Image (cartoon, rainbow, N blue to C red):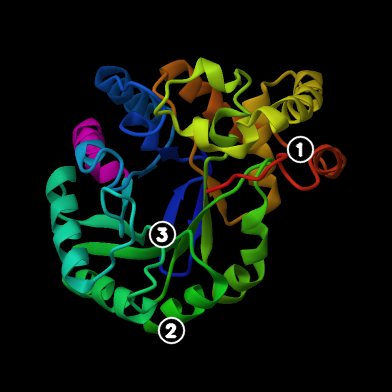
Amino acid sequence: MRQRTLGRQGLTVSEISYGAMGTAFAYGPSDDTASITAIRRAHELGVTHFDTAEMYGWGEGEKLLGNALAPIRDEVTIATKFGLTPTFAPNSRPEHIREVVDNSLRNLSVEVIDVLYQHGPDPDVPVEDVVGVMKEFVDAGKVRYLGLSNTDAESIRRAHAVHPISVLQHEYSIFAHDSEQFFPVLEELGIGLVAYSPLARGFLSGAVKSREHYDAGDIRQMIPWWAPENFDQNLSIVTELTKIAEGKGVTLSQLALAWLLAKKDYIVPIPGSRDRERVAQNIAAADLELTAEDLARIDEIAPRGGIGGRGM
């Protein structure tokens, strides 16, 4: 597995990494045994960076990931996030940040968090104050690198002026192009991009189903790509993309991940799966090289991403 450098502070990770949200949140019933097996299989195949958050099961996701990575802790980097409440309201007050980060260290059973993100902006707390508290943990040796998630370009600049930001995490896939607006500021400041939901929350997995196939609490019930008025159009996009993938002898998910890797050399996608075979399939995307013609054809098929927008 090749490595990519995120930011200018020394963070280096596998070019395909692992997002652990689905092990504890959003995509139906969890299976801890399968998740741990999948996480360890990812590492066996070269993945060195694993991403979680407090809100993924409100600590349960962190505990699971910490357990899975305990035998190989020194061989990987771990990222987590703070900044939300159980009602999904923002909360980045300094005292809350300190409480959550201390809890995350315990949940993960680690002495240091490799990457700490603010999960999203808090309109009641200036980002300078937020990063000031995050810097306290860097100075104390409890956090190595800082990141922001789901924010805006102005906040990135303001945060970076307080302490160097190594990475922005934002949704990016063939179906969601919002992240491209950040390329100029990321390149100016030397910040990497971690692309979450690189398979469009499953729409680009090669096994997409309509809403009635998912549990009532499944996050896809709320995403416009699956809305009845959009689903068939998006399925048509998937059909055309699948033709490209089949022509190359790869899966749709591999094509989607290779598309991200080809966009910029500072982009790292974090697909997640509880299935060890699916994990292996995703990682194999690192071997697929897309041509300029391939990229142009993909952008022609989905020029604005998925129909209806990502909605989150």
- Mark 1: which amino acid? Leu
Q: Which residues are magenta?
A: 63-76
Any mark on residue 161, and which?
Answer: 2
Residue occupying the point 64% across, 55% down: 178
Disc on the earlier residue, 3 or 2: 3
Q: Are marks 3 and 2 in contact (CB under 8 Å)?
A: no
Find the distance from the CA under tag 1 to the CA under tag 3.
Answer: 26 Å
How packed mark 3 is, by other alpha carbons closer than 10 Å (few <14, some 14-19, many 20 or more), is some
In the picture of the structure, the residue carrying the numbered disc 3 is 11
Marker disc for residue 310: none
- Whole-angstrom CA distance, mark 2 to mark 1, is 37 Å
Q: Earlier in the sequence, mark 2 or mark 1?
A: 2
Q: Where is mark 1, residue-wise?
A: 290
Place residue 252 in its image quadrant: top right
Characterize the magenta stretch by its predominant secondary structure. Answer: helix
Q: Kindly indicate the quadrant of the structure image that contains residue 228.
A: top right
Figure check: 69 above or below 284: below
Q: Secondary structure at mark 2?
A: helix
